[in-house]
Every structure is written in structure tokens, then in C-alpha cells.
Image (cartoon, coloured by chain):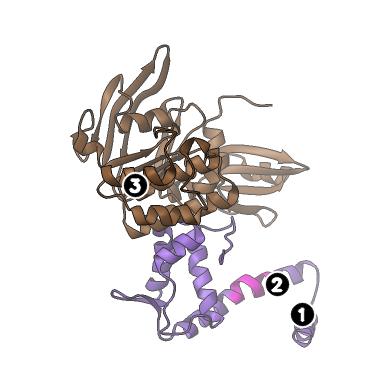
Amino acid sequence: MIEIKNVTKDYKDVRALDNVTLTFEENKIYGLLGRNGAGKSTLLNIITDKVFPSQGEVLVDGEKVSNNDEVLGKMFLMNEKNYYPEAMKVYEIFNWTDKFYPDFDLVSAFELAEKFKLNTKSRVKALSTGYASIFKAIVALCSNAKYILLDEPVLGLDANHRDLLYKVILDRYATVRRTIIISTHLIEEVSSVIEELVIIHNGKVLLQDSCEKVLSSGFTITGKIQDVDEYINGKDVISTETFGGLKNAYVKGKPQNVPSSLEVTKLDLQKLFIQLTNDKEGL
Amino acid sequence: MFIEFSDEKPIFIQIAEWIEDAILAGRYEEEQQIPSITEFSVACKINPATALKGINLLVDDGILYKKRGLGMFVAKGAYEKLRSKRKEMFYENFILSLVKEAKRINIDKNDIIKMIERGFEND
């Protein structure tokens, strides 16, 4: 279990994290969602002791992470930044990682490289944005660490490779249960993959709950503007949008006594997220 | 992808309905093994907890059962059970709304019966 206790991080005049308290349980897949600059990467870097908090602490399996090699060995962070020597070739880094991480699954790393058509003889610096992400994700997923933290793992990946990566994540998870934290802003894509949802915004935790609970906490209703307005009158409405005489309303609660002129569908996670994290910007 | 998910219902219910349809269509026969939680999870890109929840709905209904260490199997009598369940749903989902709509636009009973006969002939 990863426990984040009252963690605050200040960079000069910016508060990147503001008194964050969060728990990541064992053997679950988490989605860490937030807009650009919300504090996702800072949080992952603090968990893995790459950045020090201004206040608060992080415990992994009950032990403090700061300067604790044993605890740090339980975690593997795939970072947006590249910490690998750029002149090295992919296969050299696989072999090198295998020496330093006793649980590293070298065979699977080469198999996955093959699946993604990642050229293992290529130098790290020669990889495209997409293949750099794939390469780092493979190393992280094959680390077999108890806690795998993936920071924007689908950055620069095309639709086919994103699809394959989600399948690979689920396949690795099926082989050995572990905690996987995926930070992303591509919400709709990960919503079926993750079990738990954490939304952070402006350095604060806005929401932590099971994905399914969140999805069943409300619904979407569609129909003629007048009919929708009549139905949502007095209800807890998250947001609405209109187009060509029709109206969509995102409503909290369970749909009840819906007239046949209206259509009910699931809550749209992306819409909920935009609404929750909207700082009154836009057209 | 074998299962196309829609936005109308939770994914775990759609998994359960997909298995039900496959049993009714004879793709999975009684005492035959169905795909594992992992196979559903990876093929459909869904969390295994979601797949498990869908499958457990059918275990509770006696449609599927677990063989220890082997996996999930279609129970004896599952086909008949599903058929009578769907027959009941057919009345609720189709016949009741058909009658309601017919009344609304003034089609009488005999006309409906004729239409149904025509439907069977044209099928």
C-alpha cells in the first residue's frame, strides 16, 4: 500500500501539490487523471523519492520512502523524462536493467519489443516520441516491481499502439497481480482499463473512488430542449450542452420516471472530468 | 474486438449479455468452457474486476459454474433457463410496447396479427 500523507510541494512561487492525502491499495489498476500541470508528475516523482516534498511524507508498505533503497526497489516509475544514457541501444538497456533489477523479465521485454516492432538495435536517442514511450513502458512493465507507475505511457502513440499497450498492461496484470498507476489525460480510453479513479486538479485531490461507482453516480439524458429542461428541473445537474434543437444534460443520481421522449445513456467520464476541472475557460 | 460496447449500460452487464447471447446462439454449449477472465480482460480492454462481475451475475443465475483450477463452464439446463428468461423479457420489451404504440396510432388487434403473419412469411 502506498500512503501519501499531507504532502505539499512548493516550487518557488508555485504550489504544485497542496496538502494531498491519498492511498493506493495493492493489486489494483489506478487512473491518475488531471489536466496539464495538475500535479500528476510531481506526485509520482515524490512517491518514488525523485523529488522531495516541502511538507508531508510518503509511506510504502508502512515504511518511509525517503532514502530507503529497499522500499524504492519495490517501485518502478516510467517517467516522461528519459533517464537512460541516450547513446545506448535498446537491447543494451534491457540487458543492463536485467543486471540491476533481479525481478526483471528479460524474455518478455524482447517479446514485447517484437510485438510493438521496436527495433532493439536502435539507439535510445534515435527513437521517435512514440517509440520512446513504448520502450520505457516495456522496461517498466517487465520490471515486475510491486508498484508500477506509468506517467503518460501513451504519449505520442498512434491508435493501434495505444490499443496494444492497454492490452499488454492488462495481460501483465493478469500474469502477476500488482499495483499499476497510469497517469493520463486521455480519460475515455483508460476508463474501462482502470478499477480506481483519482482526479487531481491544481495540486488538490478532487475525487478518489472506484471507476464504476463514479460512472453509476449519474447519467446522461438527451432529447428536445424543452423536454430535457422540464425533466431536469429540480435535479442535480452537472452540466448541459445544446445542439440543433437538442439538449444533453449530465445529471447526478439514478434515472427515474424518464418520459419516453427522452433517451438515457451512461455518464460520460470525459464530460464529468471537464466539468470538474474547468476553471471557467473556453469560448 | 468481439464485443462492441454501447454507452447504454454498464460494461459488466454487457459482458453477461454477450455470454447469454452466445449460449442462446449455440456458440457455447452446455458443459463447454467459456473464455477466462483474463481472456475477456485483454481482448475487450477491460479491467478483470469488471469481467469477473459480469461473469458472477451468470454464476448467481446458475447459467455458469466454476470448475476449480479449470475455469468457467456453461451449466446444464442453461439454454432452457435463458430461453424462458428471454421469453419473459420479449413480452416486457416488445409486446407491451407494441400494444402501446398500436393503441396510440389506432391499429387494432386483427391488423397486428396480420402484420405478424406477414413478418413471418417475409422472414
Identified at 65% across, 26% down, the residue is A282
Q: Is residue B51 left or right of residue A6?
A: right
Q: Tell me the subunit letter for badge 2.
A: B
Vertical side of A109 occupied by A52: above or below: above
| Magenta span of residues | B90-98
Query: For chain B, what colour was chosen?
Result: purple
What element does badge 2 sit on? helix
State whether discs 2 and 3 lie on one chain: no
In the image, the chain rendered in brown is: A
Q: Is residue A236 left or right of residue A102?
A: right
Which residue is tagged 3?
Answer: A95
What element does badge 3 sit on? helix
Q: Nearer the viewer, mark 2 or mark 3?
A: 3
- Residue B98, which numbered label? 2
Which residue is tagged 1?
Answer: B112
Can the viewer see residue A255? no
